[in-house]
Image (cartoon, grey):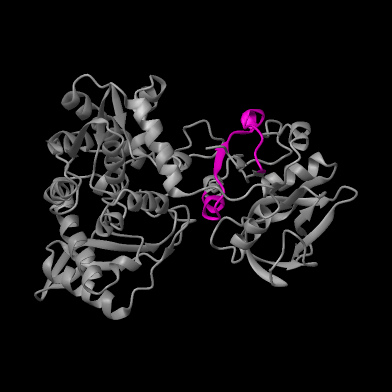
Amino acid sequence: MQTQIAVIDYGSQYSQLIVRRVRELGYFSRLFLPEQLNSVGRPAGIILSGGPRRVSDPDAPDVDFEFLKSLGCPVLGICYGMQLLNCKFGGEVSRTGDREYGPAIMRIHDENSLMKNMPSESRIWMSHTDSVSDLPEGSEVLGNNLKGQPVAIRWNDNFYGIQFHPEVSHTEHGRTIIGNFLSMVKEKPAFLMEKFKDELLESIARTVSGKRVVCAVSGGVDSTVLAALLKEAGADLHPIFVDNGLLRKNEVEDVKGQFKRLDMEIDCVDASDAFLKGLKGVTDPETKRQIIGDLFIDTFFEKAGKLELLAQGTLYPDVIESATSGSIASRIKTHHNRVDRIIQLQKEGRIIEPLSELFKDGVRELGQTLGLPSDILHRHPFPGPGLAVRVIGEVTRDKLDLLREVDAIFINILKDTGWYDRIWQAGAVLLPVKSVGVKGDERAYEHPVTLRAVTSTDAMTADWVFLPHEVLTIISNRILNEVEGVNRILYDISTKPPASIEWE
C-alpha cells in the first residue's frame, strides 16, 4: 500500500504513536528516518516528529528542506520538527527557561485551517527544552501558551508547526488537530484493516513459500493473531510454546486449550529449569531480559532444528522502546524480541514480523477480521519475560510461586467484579524487601506486594485505574488470608510517563 502520510522520526518516544493516530483517521502512514525522506515517494502529507535533541546541537538530525518544499504537500512539524522548520524558514530557537514537561494551556488566536473546531483555550502536553524565540518574516502565530510563547505556527500555506504533542491522549483536542492537518491533503483516506490484512497475507505467502516457519506462541493476543495469520497465509507452520517457568498460574494448560479451539496443535517445551538456572543471582533488569531472550532463542534452535524462518509477534511499541532498529530514540528497555541474537537473525533474513507496524488495538482489529474469539482478542497483555520482570531483584522458584498465587487472586477478582474488561493490563509485583506485620498474634516478617492496573490504548502512555475501595478491600483481604508469605498490599498509582507499565 502506498504511504499516504510519511512520519519522519527524529527520535521521539511518541513517533510511532503519530502513525497510529493517522491510521485511526483512515490514512495509511509509515515511519521513516530523516535520511530516508528522499525515498518515500510522493506522500500526500509529511509529519516531522519530536525528538530528544536540540536543533542547535552539532550532530542534530536535519531535513532536506529543498526536497521537502519540492513535494508541494502539507507538512506538520511537532516539537523538534516545529523548531527545525522554524530555523529552516529563517527563524531562531533558543532556551527560554526551564524545560516544559507536562500539561499546559494553548490559547488560539483565531480559527484557521489547523485549529478548526477548537475551543479558544485547551489543554496540551509539552515535552521540550527550547522554544521559538524569533519568527521568520511572513509567518503567523496560531496559538500561544499562557506565557505568551508561540506553540502553533503557520509559515506558509503548506507548512505548519506545533510545540506540543497532539498524538498523546493528554492533549485533549489532539485528534482534532491531526484531523485538521489531514483535511489539507489531496488524497482520500485509504487505510482499512481488511485491505491491510490482504496485503499482509500476500506478503507473508511470498516470504514463507517453500520454508518452514517456527512461530513463537505465548497465548497472548499478539502471538495468537500472528499464528492465525500465518495459518491463513498457508505457511508450513510449527508453533512452539516455551514454558520458561516464568508464567502465570495454569498458563501452560490454558494456552494448549486456547490453540485447540483454533484448530492448531502447539509443541510445548518445558525449559523452566534452564531459565531459572540462568537467572540465578541476577538482579539487573536489562541483564534479566537479555538472558531470557538468549535462552528463548537457544530453546528454539534446539527444538526446531534447522531454523529457516522465525516468526515473532513484535509490535510498534516494542521497536520504538528498544530503539535498536536505527531510530534516534533513547533506549527505554530491551524487549525480549530485540536482543542481540534476534538482531543477528534479522540481518540474516531469518526473522518475519508481520505485526511490527501495528499497535495492540490494531492487532485486535486484525484478529477480528481473521475471526478469532473475543475472549482471546481482549486478553490482557503479558510481558515477554513473564513474571521475571515482576519479581524485583533475583528470581527464584519460591518467589514465582508466591507471585503466581497473588496474581491469580487479583485477576480472578477483577473478572468476577466486571473490572477485567475495563482495564488494559493488570498484574502484581513482588518487592525485594520485607515488612513487619502481625499474623495469629505473632510477629510476621513477610513480603509486600504491589498491585498495578492501568488503562491505555497503545501502551505508549497509561493511566492508573481508580478501582473502587470495596474491590481493593476484597482483593487485599483474600491475598493476605490465602497467600502465605505476604503481609502487605500496595496499589501503584503512577502514570506512564514517567513510570513504565512494568516495573522492570
Q: Nearer the viewer, residue 461 or 331?
A: 461
Residue 238: image quadrant is top left
Asked whether the viewer can see residue 358, the reply is no
380 vs 330: above or below: below
Would residue 131 be found to the left or right of residue 338 on screen?
A: right
Determine if the magenta segment contains residue 34.
yes
Q: Nearer the viewer, residue 185 or 179?
A: 185
Q: Residue at x 38, y 19 (%)?
A: 348
Please identify the residue farthest to the left as the structure is shown. 440
Would residue 202 be found to the left or right of residue 59 on screen?
A: left
Determine if the magenta segment contains residue 459.
no
**Which segment is the magenta one?**
20-45
Q: Residue at x 76, y 40 (%)?
A: 72
19 vs 449: above or below: above
337 vs 76: above or below: above
| Residue 95: % across, % down | 75, 49
| Residue 51: % across, % down | 61, 43
285 vs 21: above or below: above
| Residue 463: % across, % down | 44, 64
Would residue 265 be found to the left or right of residue 469 on screen?
A: left
